Amino acid sequence: MTKRSRSGQVFALPAKLCFVAFLGALALPASWGCSNGSIVSQGGQGGVGGNRSSSGGTGGVNVTITLTTSTRPADAGTDANRTCTPDSGKCYAVVDAGAYCGDGIVQADRGEKCDDGNRIGGDGCSGTCQVEPNYTCPVAGQPCISTVACGNGIREPGESCDDDNTKSGDGCSGTCSVEPGYTCPVAGQPCQPLVTCGDGRLQSGEQCDLGSDNGNGKGCDVHCGLQPGWACKGHTCQLVPVCGDGQVTGGEECDEGAKSSGTGCCENCKIMASYCSCPPSGGVCQDNSRCGNGVLEKEELCDDGNTKDGDGCTAKCQIETGWQCRMAGKPCNPLCGDGKILQGEQCDDGNSDTGDGCSSICQIEPGASCSGTPSVCTKAICGNKKVEAGESCDDGNTVPFDGCSPTCQKDPECGTSTSAVGACKTACGDGIQVRGVEECDDGNVLDHDGCSKDCKIEPGNTCR
């Protein structure tokens, strides 16, 4: 082995020594060497301030070590358990337990406490043949045995719990791991659930929690699970409607059960008509429809509130010929314009025109007279000195304020026999309504035109 200084001088070194420049010169035992004869180069160190650089520290030297052959001794002496291996240009000492550790024989005189036939640590017997914690190695050459036992009530390395059993589902699993939703603070004692059913708080693992109402038939059982047929959201549970189970629940209006009554009253658990009555809790619905109740139901075309024939609506609530029934619960009216005078009609000239003497509702218009079937109407002529239909006077002219108005209605009589000043007197049909005495006054004394001949408002009419 040779050493060369920065000046190029070569110095002879003993064959059994290696020098590596770090903080100074370090002598290595002869058993430390590099098996492949690598060249190890290291910059100088030392000098003023101890600065280190690739060109040598101040006052230091650059050293090149050349290992031409392996310097490991072949006699496996006390230094045979140490080698020098190249690693990124540096050599490091590797501790070797010796040739005997790992042979399956416990060499007590060499400090071995176990020997399981390998030098792998972590299996109970370390790489230096020492018994590792929580293991026992009773038989040389055989695997060591862990002293950690799940279920013995003692929390040992690798265990997060030990409740003195190996059952799962109680908070500590069969492998001594804490199960979700539990805490196991004391070894050898039962684990405690993080969630408490019945505290009214919906927590992990619970489907519902109604507190003291659990198990009372309100949707949540005593184990915080949903009861059949219920749905819970937050702290509110509701029955899930099942149409056809015979019970009215949720948004159902009726429920006749699996078999319908055939009335047509309940379809898809909804009441189909106003004439149907269904039990509020569920059951068979009743069809209460009938002719004559004043309500239009089912196949009825009319319902005038009775079951008499001849009034426009038959006893079976069908419209009779020549009649019209416009509103349920009200009397039917003759079909005006068919040329036939039926009950309630004063005339029927075969049309529904207004202004020809017979109105669109088959009533004689003011100032007209009608006769025959179909009706032939003639309008009165005011001023011909003939008191005709709808006239209360006819003075032969249409001059106002002469006692007979231009429409041939009597003027009010005002004053007294000796003076024109005084209260006025009116008569029904003069077109002047006297409040508190007359309900209406349409200027004639005809019935069935909304204002009767005695100035009363006829049913179904409004006069202003």
Image (cartoon, helix red, strand yellow):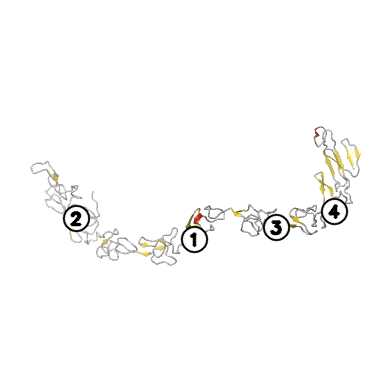
Q: Amino acid at mark 4?
A: Asp
Which numbered disc flags the more N-terminal residue, 2 or 4? Answer: 4
- The residue singled out by tag 2 in the image is 447
Above or below, comparing residue 431 to residue 57 in the picture: below
- The residue singled out by tag 4 in the image is 109
Label 4 crowd bin: few (<14), some (14–19), many (20+), radius 10 Å: few
Q: CA distance from mark 2 to mark 4?
A: 143 Å
| Residue 399 in sight in this render | no
Residue nearest the viewer, comparing 237 with 31: 237
Q: Amino acid at mark 1?
A: Gly
Q: Is residue 4 left or right of residue 246?
A: right
Residue shown at 40% from the left, 63% from the top: 266
Q: Is residue 433 left or right of residue 194?
A: left
Which numbered disc flags the more N-terminal residue, 2 or 1? Answer: 1
Which numbered disc flags the more N-terminal residue, 4 or 1? Answer: 4
Give the quadrant of residue 328.
bottom left
Residue 385 x, y percent position in the rendering? 11, 50
- The residue singled out by tag 3 in the image is 149
Q: Is residue 75 left or right of residue 150?
A: right
Residue 87 x, y percent position in the rendering? 80, 46
CB under 8 Å between discs 3 and 4: no
Q: Amino acid at mark 2?
A: Asp
Q: CA distance from mark 3 to mark 1?
A: 47 Å
> Which dot, 2 or 4, sits closer to the camera?
4
Which numbered disc flags the more N-terminal residue, 2 or 3? Answer: 3
Q: CA distance from mark 2 to mark 1?
A: 68 Å
Q: Which mark is residue 218?
A: none
> Which dot, 4 or 1, sits closer to the camera?
4
Which numbered disc flags the more N-terminal residue, 3 or 4? Answer: 4
- The residue singled out by tag 1 in the image is 229
